[in-house]
Image (spheres, rainbow, N blue to C red):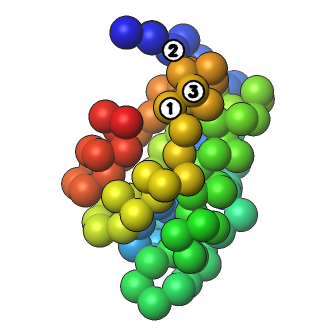
Amino acid sequence: MIKPSRLRKGDVVGIVAPAGVVDSALLEKGLKRLRALGLNPLLGEHVLSRHRYFAGTDEQRAGDLIAMFKNPEVKGIFCARGGYGGNRLLPWLKPKLIRDHPKIFVGASDLTLLLLY
């Protein structure tokens, strides 16, 4: 098992939306809470995008997640919300990329599939 480093005050955490559309007011509340914990949130490019009932196309959502894993400044990745759609990202994800860039990864609901990937 690969164990990423714990988060510390001042760390940058990536915010992605691998599934459903994100409510901007709820997102802002979450960002405020992360900042209160001493973390510095970095939004994925498509967090507030909309494509049907998803937060962007499958490729856009996968691209945001991949970008956060590749970004050396990002120490953890938080999903803005759960819901259906995370499983649709699997064709773009590469296990080696995730193994080579271990990070704390937080999500809920149907995103459990991504957490296990």
Is 59 positioned to the left or the right of 74 in the image?
left
Q: Secondary structure at mark 2?
A: loop
For marks 1 and 2, the one nearer the N-term is 2
Quadrant (top left/top right/bottom left/bottom right) for the C terminus: top left
Who's the residue at 56% across and 76% down the image?
A: 57
Residue 23 horizontal/vertical position (percent): 46, 76
In whole angstroms, how far apart are the C-alphas of marks 2 and 3? 15 Å
**Residue 95, numbered label:** 1
In whole angstroms, how far apart are the C-alphas of marks 1 and 2? 15 Å
Q: Can residue 38 be seen from the camera position used here?
A: no
Who's the residue at 50% across and 31% down the image?
A: 95
In whole angstroms, how far apart are the C-alphas of marks 3 and 1? 4 Å
Q: Identify which amino acid the numbered label 1 is placed on.
A: Pro
Vertical placement of 57 versus 103: above or below? below
The image quadrant of residue 69 is: top right
Give the labeled residue for mark 3: 96
Vertical placement of 99 versus 110: above or below? above
Give the labeled residue for mark 2: 4
Residue 47 horizontal/vertical position (percent): 59, 66
Residue 4 horizontal/vertical position (percent): 51, 14
| Residue sitting nearer the eye, 46 or 37 | 46
Is 115 positioned to the left or the right of 43 in the image?
left
